[in-house]
Amino acid sequence: MSPSESKVYFAGLSTESESTNFPTKIGLLFKHLKPETFISDGDLVAIKMHFGEPGSHAFIMPMYVQKIVKVVCELGGKPFLTDTNTLYKGPRQNAIDHLNTAMGHGFVPGVVDAPVIIADGLTGKDFARVKVDLKHISHAHIGSAVNLADVFIALSHPTGHIATGYAGALKNIGMGCGNRAGKQAMHADFKPEVKEKKCIGCGECARWCPAAAIVIVNKKARVSPDKCIGCGECVSSCNTGAISIEWDTPMELLQMKIVEYAYAVLKNKNNKIGFMNFLTNIVPDCDCLPYSDTALVGDIGILASCDPVALDQATVDLINAQPGNQASRMAKNGLAENEDKFRAVWDIDYTIQLKYAEEIGLGSRAYDLKTI
Ligand code: SF4
Ligand code: SF4
């Protein structure tokens, strides 16, 4: 291992015994991060999750999370599972709906043995203003429970993503810990365009737009640029593909802002951090959508690292080394099975987030992969 390489630990899924089953491997893998070096007795330990959208099934299962909770508790830490409210209207837009969604997916104390705390409070206004003074963000708005925690652990489910191409640990940390205003600031450069020929005037986009920026005029959607906050919700709510987003510069900017937010989240943690990516159900869309499409590749395993950049780089490398699922959307787009799986679906250069994260010192893209 060269000095610049970060350690990334891998556990595959193959097993023929109880002692090496998937839940057991999760606990073992986490212990390879030497959590006793960054979790002390009495530490408040934020475990950043995504509890899934009702209708989706690809999110990380509660029984897996419990394995991490158990190790944290054995070390005297006080774990809580956490996420922030969404910018768009939906079943995770405030703490009540969000907690009900989490409970509906089994994130309850009897299963995960830890409480769920929505990091930015009842309505997304409970935040810490963190000074970063980076290229695009001077101050980040981070959910206060995340900011106050002594230790930060992110359990991420890598997927494709409509706006970033790939979403893994960096996105879970950056976008996932910003409060609603923070998320708005990260998205602010997107401007949607309506293709009138494809618009059937159904009004779904207007129904879901959180900024009331869309009206239907003569059976066609019309976006008011002054009101639009660039959240992208209209794109995913339109079933006819009538709304697209101008990707050029904004796509790069979004990734860089997400990375700057991740920097803000980790800034005060004094290396009391750990990250795991669950490479299972690797679907084309993120867990915010109310469905989970056919996976792009078969299930691979779990990765763990104290470096989120190395972790995401190893994740995309492992995924792209797999044969593509010819029953997936990737194949429907007419692309060969060995092409980059995320670019095959979204044609977005998602490596911007990895390169920029390395540039600002969040970690290294070089890694040494150890299989346990
Ligand atoms: S959801 Fe799509 S088709 Fe329906 S009104 Fe909006 S842009 Fe038009
Ligand atoms: S019009 Fe703008 S604010 Fe409304 S859903 Fe679309 S991107 Fe979001």
Image (cartoon, rainbow, N blue to C red):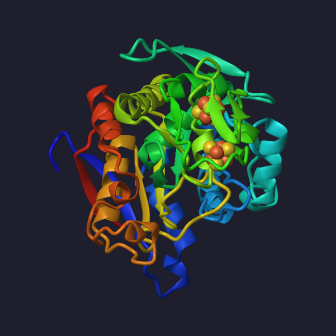
Residue extending furthest toward the front:
218
The spot of residue 286 in percent (x, y) is 55, 52
Front one among 347 and 193:
193
The answer to which quarter of the image holds residue 94 is: top right
Res 298 visible = yes
* Of residues 284 and 208, the one drawn nearer to the viewer in this rendering: 208
Where is residue 305 drawn, in percent x and y? Answer: 39, 49
In this view, 274 is above or below 294: above
Query: Residue shown at 44%/31% (left/top)?
Result: 254
Identify which residue is drawn at 27% across, 36% down.
355
Q: Is residue 273 above or below residue 237?
A: above
Q: Is residue 326 above or below residue 314?
A: below
- At 47% across and 55% down in the image, what residue appears? 158
How many badges with numbers are in the image?
Answer: 0
Residue 270 in sight: no
Name of the residue lying farthest toward the left: 2
Side of 325 where 217 appears, left or right: right
- In the figure, is residue 276 to the left or right of 290? left
Using the rendered view, name the quadrant where residue 82 is placed.
top right
- Residue 185 horizontal side relative to residue 97, left or right: left
Q: For the point 62% across and 41% down, which residue is it?
A: 234
Q: Residue 171: x percent and y percent?
A: 48, 40
- Whether 174 is drawn above or below 100: the answer is above
In the rendered image, which quarter contains the C terminus? bottom left
At which x and y percent is residue 81? 68, 45
